Amino acid sequence: MKPTKVIEKRDEHFAYGSVLEAVSKGLYPDRKHVLREFIQNAFDALGDLRHSHPKEPLRPVEITASAPSLIIADKGIGMSEEAMRRYRYLGFSEKQIGLHAGFRGIGKFSAITVCDRLIVRSSRLGEPKSYQVEIDAAGMWKRLQTDRNPPLESLLQDHSTFAETDEKPELHYTFAELHGVHGDAMELLDANIIKPYLAQTAPVPFEPAFPYGAEISQRLHQVNPEFLEVGILVNREPVYKPFLADASRPDYKEVFAAKDPTELIALAWFCQHLGKGQFRDAGESGKRGQRHPHSGLHYRASNFTIGDSMLTRKTLWQTTPERAFYFFGEIHVLDSGVTPTSDRDNFEDTSARGRLYDRCREISAVLSFRAGLKSQQLRFGEVVASGEGFVTETVKQLQAGQLESELKEEKEYEVQKFLEDLAKRLKQSSRSSQKDEKNIRRARRVQRKAQNLYGRLKSNGNGHRFFVDITKDLKMDPKTKAVYEAIISVLREEFRQEPGRFAAVVRKIHDTLRKGIKC
Amino acid sequence: MLKSPQQFTANKQVVRDLQCEAIRQHLAAKLGKLSYIGLPSSSLEDVQQWFPLFERITAVERGEAGKEWVLQHELQLNAFKLDLSQKLSLLRGDIDAVLIKGADDFGNKPVWPYDVVSLDYSGGLFYQDQNSQPTRLEAIRCLFQHQQTARASEFVLLLSFRLDRIDQREVRESLNGIRRDLKRYGFQGDQVVDAYLDHPKEQARLKLYVMHMINYIAVQAHFDTTSESPAFYFGNRDAEMMAFRFHHKAARKTFAPRSPKERLNQMINRRMIEIVRGKQTFTNLGLPLIKAESDA
């Protein structure tokens, strides 16, 4: 039935204050993410400056954490009047997905959960004005409680101000102060907390001591001209991306789309632990011996960390996941279709993400192989070293005439087993694409020594006195000798699985016989 | 010497130049690495002038009652815009309270010692709190204690204030105390002290009072003092102002405080500087100089 009467429009509101709570408290349970949101804005502003004015130097972002305020200040392109007016809008952003780290227009509201007042002043390069937005966060929350969920528009309008003042056109900046940081967000004012957080998550340069930092940055820039590193100072001290010592030179892996092998969707770099197994905490973070917190690979989008090393472990490693921590490194996501979630702990569940994870499993395959190879090489080295020790010791004993004849059989067996194991490992190592030449040479030397030893054992020393024959030393008569040999035979059988114990028992018998019993 | 900006009054700029001269003269070996605590304007033009001399600047800003954050925000914003933020830190609150309590309104503490302490009070020296306690004078005493505790070897103190609500009793008692000391040391004190007490200008009495007070507070904290000629001038809105400059050097030879190194006759005989329309003139305001009893 066709409507015949137009209902008069009512004065309606379509959004209420509780939305604010959802997008602020709900999305940012970790207070430090509030800082990350402002760093993202600063990063985007600096990126825009680089685009529009490539000759302008990029100055570090300055963070001042001193009660009662947290200040994040950048000398990026700055915001225009319109952008500043819209700063107070919820969900509005002119930023582009894929080009900018932040783009949802809600990050700035994270601040209102942690402070009494947000004051932002900005001036855009070339404009003779600066603009200030002040949001009375304490007032808004109070009103939300007393007015029972007022309309969002009136809440934002009544508790925010906009002002302008003259400014030198050559100045460009954004200066954000979170004033009156709450007691439950004091970590935001603790440089010892925010520095390591930013070191792990923000697009900062590598520590100068890391010998491969410049190389990695250059490589990333080659595949992604948008790649940007931004200096950050926290209370006048620079923040750097951490690295782990005792690591190999970085290696790189480009990941392409399955359907289009020319479409680069990610670039990974990784450094392998030169020691055995996983990177271990040497005690710097108070957890000596445990897996190092900086180990593993991290996803990065626009050079911001997404999730943690467990995310890559979970999404890429189907077998031997512990090998993820034999490395440290990053996977820079270059596919603009892959979008981080609001809280940046994963990517949004889309087909693009599925494709990314699927293709990036190549990385874990490479790393797993490398880790296996490394383990093999390390084990090879250990076998060679311990074998060399064993051979040297046995030769010494023989030359000194200290080796009991009862143990000859066992020694022959040990040397034979060692030679077989060594031959197998030598064959493996010689075939490997990453030969450990030094170890191979050492292994061949030890092999020759062991073969020589084996020959001498088999030939009973070629006429030289090699073995200690207690039956001869004590001049045992044939009957006594027969009894003695029977006992030794039983003991040998009994201790077949414990050759070390058999040797100890034989030595004890010899000592006892020499001390007191005369045949 | 840095170029003078135009935003200070001509008289104030002369004072600034005299202060800069004192810093350069007494702290020549450390120029470029000096530390400073004081009350810069939120626009920071004063700090900007002297910036190359300093490695570390602590600015104290109280802000306006009820909206303190406005000026404090402005100060930090300007520091950032002017590329001063790497050297500058902010303490929020009244400087006297900071000196007395040892921290600002939010528990942030100054990092002692400082090479230059600038107490540029817009009000009078004899300001009292609600309990009638002389807060400013107490703050100056605490300043010396902080410097002593931090084992400052030397520093320059710049003190300026309005001639506002002078505690006449305090000043007169102090000058009469000087009279007794002068007699004790063999000087003809009565005539001189009476001339100061009867002088039509407060500047005369304050010259002696402040120099004497600072010397004695300093010596309690084991600092010897050298006073420069105090200046007097009209500042903004024709406010009568005085500006003092002192150099203090640590003197820790004995546990017990000794007498001030600067003698009373030196303080009395030190001329003043009158600044009028940006020009400075040395003057003694017609006051007599001190002679020893033996000279009589």
Image (spheres, coloured by chain):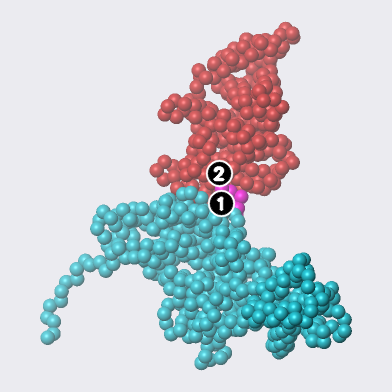
Identify the element where label 1 is drawn.
Answer: helix
Q: Which residues are magenta?
A: B83-89
Q: Is residue B127 visible?
A: yes
The disc at residue B59 is 2
Q: Is residue A116 left or right of residue B221?
A: left
Q: Chain of mark 2?
A: B
Whether A147 is drawn above or below A224: the answer is above
- Residue type pointed to by label 2: Ala
> Which chain did the renderer colour cyan?
A
The disc at residue B79 is 1
Identify the element where label 2 is drawn.
Answer: strand
Residue at the spot x=41%, y=64% of the render? A28
Q: Is residue A363 visible?
A: no
Residue at the spot x=42%, y=51% of the render? A183
Residue at the spot x=62%, y=67% of the render? A243
Q: Is residue A17 magenta?
A: no
Quadrant of the snapshot with the C terminus of chain A: bottom right
The answer to whether marks 1 and 2 mark residues whose Cβ atoms lie closer than 8 Å is yes
Color of chain B here? red
Q: Nearer the viewer, residue A375 or A443?
A: A443
Residue B158 quadrant: top right
Q: Nearer the viewer, residue A78 or A393?
A: A393
Q: Is residue B88 magenta?
A: yes
